[in-house]
């Protein structure tokens, strides 16, 4: 089903950031399992390309912060990247956890009925290639799914390439600040949603988006008071690291 600005929103309110944020090594299958164990049914992750074109999960342009590798992530072949330790940096319990491919994450989400927000995170200089490749891969992996993944990016060129490759996949513009022309940019890219830093989301911004048929999501909300404020505004999605502080399948906020 193609998602448009007039279609019922199919994604849960609560979205686990990078799988399970800080409770497990980000962007690994272990993180997704931890997030799911806390009741989360929607996840966000960062996806870029290996040198041989395999979409895989990693936030940074370089490998060293969250894996045992070094150098530019996009320069490595998947056969090499897949053997790295992507868990030992977090804690001993996760030592040896490998990087996750988008293929593996799709299998996990689809078999468990989870929704996914894929942030297209290109290695600098590969925005169009990454946007196109991730969209084509997602279309294949979710070819018969009822709920398609939401593609988001801070890079307009990546979103445009994703749109040109697979226009039926829903897209969202990511914004750390409300730069001049942001609203027109989101509409020109055919986005169904805008995802902002939670600190810039207020009633006026949300009302403007809703009036245009766009959904409003925020990142990264870890404070219960801030979450309550946003829920009160009528926010459509909350991305959080604090999977152990929020209860997405009940009232939403732990006491």
Image (spheres, helix red, strand yellow):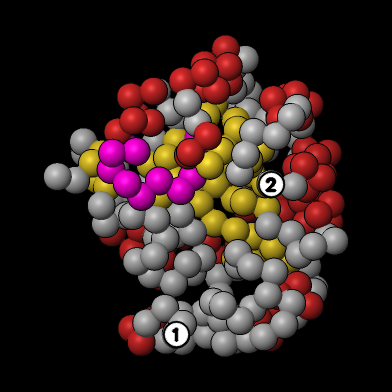
Residue located at (36% from left, 87% from top):
92
**Quadrant (top left, top right, bottom left, bottom right) of the C terminus:** top left
Residue 28 placement (x, y as % from top left): 49, 69
Residue 226 shown in magenta: yes
Q: Nearer the viewer, residue 29 or 193?
A: 193
Q: Is residue 64 left or right of residue 111?
A: right
Region rendered in magenta = 217-227
Q: Is residue 215 left or right of residue 61?
A: left
> Quadrant of the rendered structure where residue 213 is?
top right
Q: Name the residue that disc number 2 marks.
A: 154
Give the Cα distance between marks 1 and 2: 29 Å
- Is residue 26 in sight in this rendering? yes
Residue located at (79% from left, 62% from top):
124
Q: Is residue 226 left or right of residue 119?
A: left
Q: Name the residue that disc number 1 marks.
A: 88
Residue 110 placement (x, y as % from top left): 48, 51
As helix, strand or loop, the secondary structure at mark 2 comes to: loop
Instruction: Relative to 79, say whether 208 is above or below.
Output: above
Quick one: label 1 or label 2, which is nearer the N terminus? 1
> Quadrant of the rendered structure where residue 210 is?
top right
Q: Nearer the viewer, residue 228 or 194?
A: 228
Residue that extends furthest to the left in the rendered view of this protein: 255
**Mark 1 neighbour class, 10 Å CA radius: few under 14, some 14 to 19, many 20 or more:** some
Q: Nearer the viewer, mark 1 or mark 2?
A: 2
Residue located at (40% from left, 46% from top):
221
Q: Which mark is residue 112?
A: none
- Is residue 7 in sight in this rendering? no
**Mark 2 neighbour class, 10 Å CA radius: few under 14, some 14 to 19, many 20 or more:** some
- Give the total number of marks visible in the rendering: 2
**Quadrant (top left, top right, bottom left, bottom right) of the N terminus:** top right
């Amino acid at each position: 089903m193609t998602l448009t600005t007039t279609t019922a929103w199919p994604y849960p309110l609560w979205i686990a950031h990078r799988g399970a944020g800080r409770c497990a090594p980000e962007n690994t299958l272990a993180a997704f399992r931890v997030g799911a164990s806390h009741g989360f049914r929607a996840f966000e992750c960062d996806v870029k390309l290996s040198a041989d074109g395999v979409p895989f999960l990693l936030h940074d342009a370089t490998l060293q912060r969250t894996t045992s590798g070094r150098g530019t992530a996009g320069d490595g072949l998947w056969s090499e990247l897949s053997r790295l330790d992507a868990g030992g940096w977090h804690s001993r319990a996760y030592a040896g956890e490998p990087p996750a491919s988008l293929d593996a994450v799709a299998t996990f989400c689809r078999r468990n009925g989870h929704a996914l927000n894929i942030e297209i995170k290109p290695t600098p200089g590969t925005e169009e290639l990454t946007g196109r490749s991730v969209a084509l891969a997602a279309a294949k992996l979710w070819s018969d799914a009822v709920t398609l993944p939401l593609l988001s990016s801070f890079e307009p060129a990546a979103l445009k390439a994703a749109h040109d490759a697979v226009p039926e996949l829903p897209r969202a513009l990511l914004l750390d600040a409300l730069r001049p022309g942001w609203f027109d940019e989101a509409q020109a890219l055919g986005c169904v949603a805008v995802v902002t830093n939670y600190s810039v989301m207020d009633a006026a911004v949300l009302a403007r988006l809703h009036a245009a048929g766009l959904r409003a999501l925020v990142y990264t909300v870890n404070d219960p008071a801030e979450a309550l404020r946003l829920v009160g505004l009528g926010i459509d999605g909350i991305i959080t690291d604090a999977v152990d502080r929020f209860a997405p399948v009940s009232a939403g906020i732990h006491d």
